[in-house]
Structure formats: C-alpha cells, structure tokens
Amino acid sequence: MNIEKQIIEAAMSVIEELYGQKAAENTIALQKTRSDFEGNLTLVVFPFLKMSRKSPEATAQEIGEQLKAKCTAIADFNVVKGFLNLVISPAAWISMLNDIEADDCFGMKKATDDSPLVMIEYSSPNTNKPLHLGHVRNNLLGWSLAKIMEANGNRVVKTNIVNDRGIHICKSMLAWLKWGNGETPESSGKKGDHLIGDYYVAFDKHYREEVKELKEKLITEGVDEETAEKRAKDEAPLICEAHDMLVKWEQNDPEIRALWEKMNEWVYAGFDETYKAMGVSFDKIYYESQTYLEGKKKVEEGLEKGIFFRKDDNSVWADLSADGLDQKLLLRSDGTSVYMTQDIGTANMRFNDYPIDKMIYVVGNEQNYHFQVLSILLDRLGFKWGKELVHFSYGMVELPNGKMKSREGTVVDADELIASMIDNARKMSEDKVNKIEGISNDEANEIARIVGLGALKYFILKVDARKNMLFNPEESIDFNGNTGPFIQYTHARIRSILRKAEEQGIDIEKTIGEDMPLNDKEAELIQKLNEFTAAVEQAGKDYSPSGIANYCYELTKQFNQFYHECSILNADSDRERAVRLVLAKNVAKVIKNGMALLGIEVPERM
C-alpha cells in the first residue's frame, strides 16, 4: 500500500481512538517535511485541536506516539509546534521501491470500458497557410493533455476541427488562379501547405497595393481619409472577387468546389507531414465545411423552441443578459453562419458520434469570451456536458523580435522550426555522440531528432499554459538547467550505468530485501519517485502539462545530486550496489514515462 495512504488510514484510526470522534479524510494533510527538520512526511494537527482540547504540541505528541506504535511504516517522530514530523522506516521505503519496480506503469491508471470519455480538441488549423509556432504550442499542449488524462484513467478521443471554408480560404484560391500558372506541390518542390500559404501572402500584398491606390484616388476626389480607407478596403477589386468566389462556394459552384477540394488536399498532405514530425495525431477530424450546416440546423431548432430570437433584419440572436453577458449573433441577416454557429454544429456531430462525458477545447486565450458563450448555449440546447465544458485557455508564443503575422509571411514556420531544432541538436551533441563507440550515422541522426524535438517540446510545455511565453531556441537546447536535453541526458546516463552493470555480470535485483540499509539520499530519492503518482493526479485535475515537466526536472536534478554523492557501480558493498541499481533503473523508468506524458522521447544513448 502507498505509504501516505497507510499513514492516513492509521491516523484516522488513532484520532478516533484518542478523541472518540472520526476525522474527515480531507483534514489529514500530509506534506513533505521541510529540509531543516528531521523527518520525511509531516502531519498538520491543527484541525484536531477542538477534538483533543489540548495544545498543538501535546496533541501532536500523543498522536505521534500512537502512530509509531500502530503503523509499521513510521520509525520515529518529532514535534515542532503543531507539526508532527514522521520518519519513515527503511523497510517501508524498500517496500515502496519494490512496488515501483513491479509496476511498469507506476503512477498511472488504466482506463476501463466504464471510464469517463474525455474528448480533447486541438490544432484547429486554417487551410490557407502552414502550421506555425503558435500551432506548435497548441498541438503539444493538446497531445500532452490527452496523455495526462489517459494516465488518470480516462478514455480519451483526440479531435481536430479544420477551418476549411470562408473568405480567407478564397483569398488563397483566387491568388493561385491569378498568379499560379498551374503550379502544384510537385512542380514547385514545395509542401502543399507552404505553396498555398505563399498565395495567401501574395493576395495580401496585391490587395494592399490596390487599397493604397484606391484610397489615394478617393482622397483626390474629396473623400475624407477615414472614409476613403474604409471604402478602399471594401471596394478593392481583389476583395470583391474573393467575396464573389465565397458566394459561389456557398452555392456549390462545381468549378469553385473542385478547385477548393484540390487545393485543400495539397494542404492536408502538408499538414500530415508536420503532424508526423511533431509526433501528434488525431482519432477523428471534423471539417468546418460540414459542421456549419449542422450548426445552422441546431440554431433553427433553438429558434423554434424559443431559446433564440429573430430580429427584424432576419438575423438570429441569443439573449445572454440573464448570464450577465450581452446578445450574441448566431445567424446573419442573409442566413450565413458565424464561428459560434459552426462550433454548435461541431459539438452536435461529436455528441452524436461519441458518448462524451467531458469536452476540452485547447484554444488560445483570445477566445475566452467565445467559450464562455458557447458553454451557455450548448447547455441551453441540452448537451449534458455543455455547462461543464473546459476551455483550456493558453497564452501566446512570442519571439525575441516580436509577434507573428500570417498575412505578411512573418510567422515562424513549424516545419522550419522543427528542422532547425534538430539541426541545432546535431551540432550541440556532435562531441558527445562522437564519443559513443560503434554509433552509426543513422543512430546519430535519430538521437539528434529525439533531442531536438525534446528541447522544443519541453521548453514550450514547462511553462504554465495560461501564460504568454517567449520562445528562445538557443536556450531550449542547453544540456544544463531546466531543459529537455538535460533530462534526456540523465536518462541516457542511467541506461549506460545499467548496461555497464550487465557487461560486468552484475544481476540487477528484481526485488530488494526489506532488511537492506538505506542512507538519507536513497530514501529521499525513493520518496521523490513515489511523488510521481500525486504529480500525475494533480496534472489531471489542473490540466497542467507544466506540472509533469517540473516533476521530471526535479526528479532528474535530485538523481544527479545523488549520483555525484553516492557511487553506484563502485558502491561499498554488493547490498548497497543492488539497492542503487534498482533505484537508478526506476528513476530512468519514471523519467521515460513522465516525459512520454509530454510527448517527449528519451534516448538510450546520448
């Protein structure tokens, strides 16, 4: 049994025996003992003073005496005011280490057929441009969150909603028709998403030129500057053509639809390459071109039921004043949908496809209001998870030289970023990798891929998702400090120690006798391993990949301190060496499992 659970059960029994009253389990708070006091775990006794009618010191003393007599895990205790510091016995720590050793998935729960079904939406790309650094953060957070929810015993469905319709898509299509000369991904040697993204940028360049020219013309005709600016943006020939194309798309014009399908297929092929390189995937992909019609149907249903209302201009709205919000447009006067309508349609399709218990949307914090409204509307429309939907709201990624702009082509492209991170890792690790005997070029390249991606993922995921972050590629690849490569290198170092032990014919024990002596550093490291379960649970409650990242770093840092102070292969005795080898082996296992929750691989050699 888990040591903390053992102590909590014993404490509940002791308190009832001493004071004749049952203590609620949530009042028994165990925490790690402060480093300046003797002990491993501390029980706070202040919640029991009304029962004991004694001072904090006297209450802690008598609870400590009874616990020591009743619970074999407790070797000793000391009292500091209202804090009961418990010293865990070496046998209990060894028992814990043996439990960890016996469980390949230690700290993680397995889902059953009855487990809650959690659906997580992430990525949500537009088909008019390639994925960029902002999408990278979104995808990495979504994938990690899915892994963390699975590790907490949930069934998980990973979904993507592709924004494949609208004026922005028509801009790329129109630009390709005007200036593409039949160019394809094959003829240009470009990935499809990059090719289409180039035409999106080209449209904006030509459009701005048209707006400037038209604005100047209007001003010479006596129109004031502000009105001229607005009219120029609305009346520029290119934007008018793009709007006409959108109307034809809505009307199922066969030529426009065929062009749209062809260009989208190029983009999807490009996206798939990027997703594969990033190490993410989806169980189900939805498309806005399909969900917006479903959304319009649900809004019409809501209108019939009196949930929504129609204004004189024929537009449909939701009145949210009862919820402290304003009115929200759902269908324009011409009957066309807005983003909210599409999200309602997507939700309806998903609910029909899966028995969803919880829905999590991984979307940037600029959409906070949108999801506040969506939650209310879905609840009114009868979705059982509508009121409880989770908007996993994350901050923007910024660069040392400022923000990114897709229209102007100044984004950090995801493909280029991944390639440059792997290249940086190759350069940074050349000296280390070259020292490994018998390593092939293919293996060196694979190590560079694992380290480069690990650096990128860890640097992004270690930051609290709610915060804006500054991405610094050079800092992320460092082999020291709170970085992915530092943790990966420690894992590789442990695997090297275990290989050397095997080469020397040392048998790494499967279980360790509970009479084995332990020093403080060994006990502290077992305690840190044991905290992985709590770290996984907390990350699931808080929807926090950064919690897992920080745990992996703390464990790695503690192992490295242990490694510098306590020899493993050259330990003073065979018994000592046996304990340390099993300890090291399980640190490597927990690092590997913890980093996997972040979507990060760890190499065997480095």
Image (cartoon, helix red, strand yellow):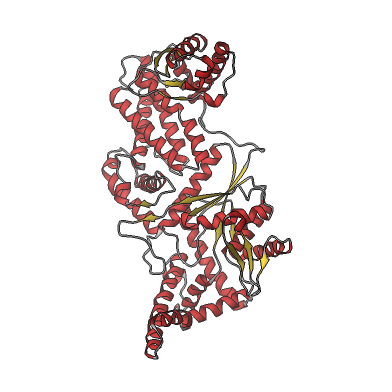
Res 510 seen here = no
Where, by quadrant of the figure, is residue 495 drawn? top left
Can you see residue 20? yes
358 lies left or right of 447: right
Residue 341 is left or right of residue 393, and the answer is right
Residue sitting at 63 percent across and 61 percent down? Answer: 319
Q: Position of residue 371 (x, y in %)?
A: 55, 55
**How many numbered badges does the structure rendering display?**
0
Q: Position of residue 566 (x, y in %)?
A: 31, 22
- Give the camera-side residue of 342 and 121: 342
**In this view, 109 is above or below 371:** above
Q: Quadrant of residue 93?
A: top left
Q: Residue furthest bottom?
A: 221
Q: Return the residue nearer the eye: 372 or 429.
A: 372
- Check the image and report above or below for 56 versus 602: above
Residue 121 x, y percent position in the rendering: 55, 52
